[in-house]
Amino acid sequence: MILEAMRLALRSIFRNKLRSFLTILGVVIGVAAVIAMVTVGQGSSAQVSASVESLGSDIVVLRPGQRGFGPPSGGTPTRRFTLRDAEAVATLPVARAVAPISTASATVVYGNANTTTSITGSTETWAEVSNWSFAGGRNFTASEVRAGAAVCLIGQTVRANLFGAADPVGQQIRVKQISCEVVGLLTPKGAGSFGQDQDDLVVMPVRLVQRRLNGDEDVNSIQIALTKGGDTAAAIVQIQDLMRERRRIGLGDADDFSVTDMKEVASMLNSVNSVLSGMLSSVAAVSLLVGGIGIMNIMLVSVTERTREIGIRLAIGATGGQVLTQFLVEAVVLSLLGGVVGIVVGLGLAWGAGRFMAIPFTPDPMVVALAFAFSAVVGVVFGYFPARRAARLDPIEALRHQ
């Protein structure tokens, strides 16, 4: 009986193709939106986790100024760090490795090719703290850092822009006005937590960047790799105490610096992603409700149009249950068709968004299954009332219907 009901349902659906398409459109939009939102949210969370893991789970970042978001609010200029601050932090037993960071932006030139990229000035410990390995060449040495030697490491994006597929190690490039030897090529890391290209960088000795690019002795931040297995909270307290002493901050006065645990940043970003994904998915799910109402409306119209047909079936011996099953199956088939199309469209949108935003495509089979099941439930719930109305028609009155 079910197979016969499905055959009749499909025949009715394909007999009115345009009307059927418009009927399932609400379900398609709802299922596609939910799957796309959830998949993109999970991909974004995976990207955040991968970025933090690539940096290292035992990393804290010391920055001047209070922790906050957005542009500075004005007032007293923030007092920057110096290399002596980084050297002092390195003496703490909780610090496994310390890398002072001085940043700049400059145009890098090789032959006829040029690119504008970010410049990171640091020490020989930068690669260890940042958990970065080498695809070729070597790291710069402590003596090169002390002397401010004109050597540099480049990322894969800079290599592609300047050298194509050629080996850049040993070549001379010009960073602004500085002629610099490429001594190391970094392994690729891809996009960061906020979609930035982590491979678009040049790393140089910090003293060289300070003297010849920035013209100061400032350090923008200090990255600290903590000892393995240590208490992160206790380590942060030691770092804060040291910096308060060095910066002569009085008892009861607020810190003019911040210490950020990268694990806390990852947790916060993942929480924000989860909340946003949940809110957007809830809004998208309203489309399923609208689609269900559309299915019920069309099924009621279908019952009215086919009243005489229903009367003939009842008159020649069909039971009310058989008529109810026929119309209920038709509503469920419409909804499931919308669910299947919605799944395909949703995964396609999520894949496209992932490529555009440079985040992983991580579809969740559970979410896909739940969206499909929910579309079936929509068909049952919103198809039941029209089907029951058809099953309860009086055969005599139905046969008189014109």
Image (cartoon, rainbow, N blue to C red):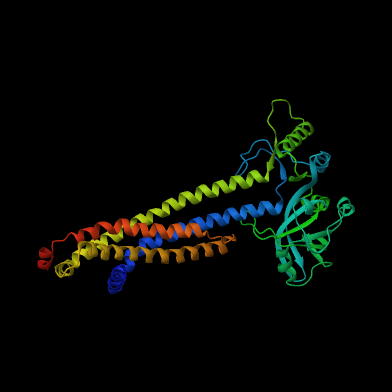
Q: Please provide percent x and percent y for residue 45.
A: 58, 53
State left or right for residue 139 relative to residue 22.
right
| Quarter of the picture holding the C terminus | bottom left
State left or right for residue 300 relative to residue 227.
left
Q: Please provide percent x and percent y for residue 347.
A: 49, 64
Where is residue 179, by image quadrant?
bottom right
State left or right for residue 182 relative to residue 293.
right
Q: How many marks?
A: 0
| Quarter of the picture holding the N terminus | bottom left
Q: Residue at x 71, y 52 (%)?
A: 55
* Relative height, residue 166 to residue 52 (above, below): below
Q: Please provide percent x and percent y for residue 237.
A: 73, 34
Residue 156 appearing in the image: yes
In front: 83, or 371?
371
Where is residue 46, by image quadrant?
bottom right
Residue 216 appearing in the image: no
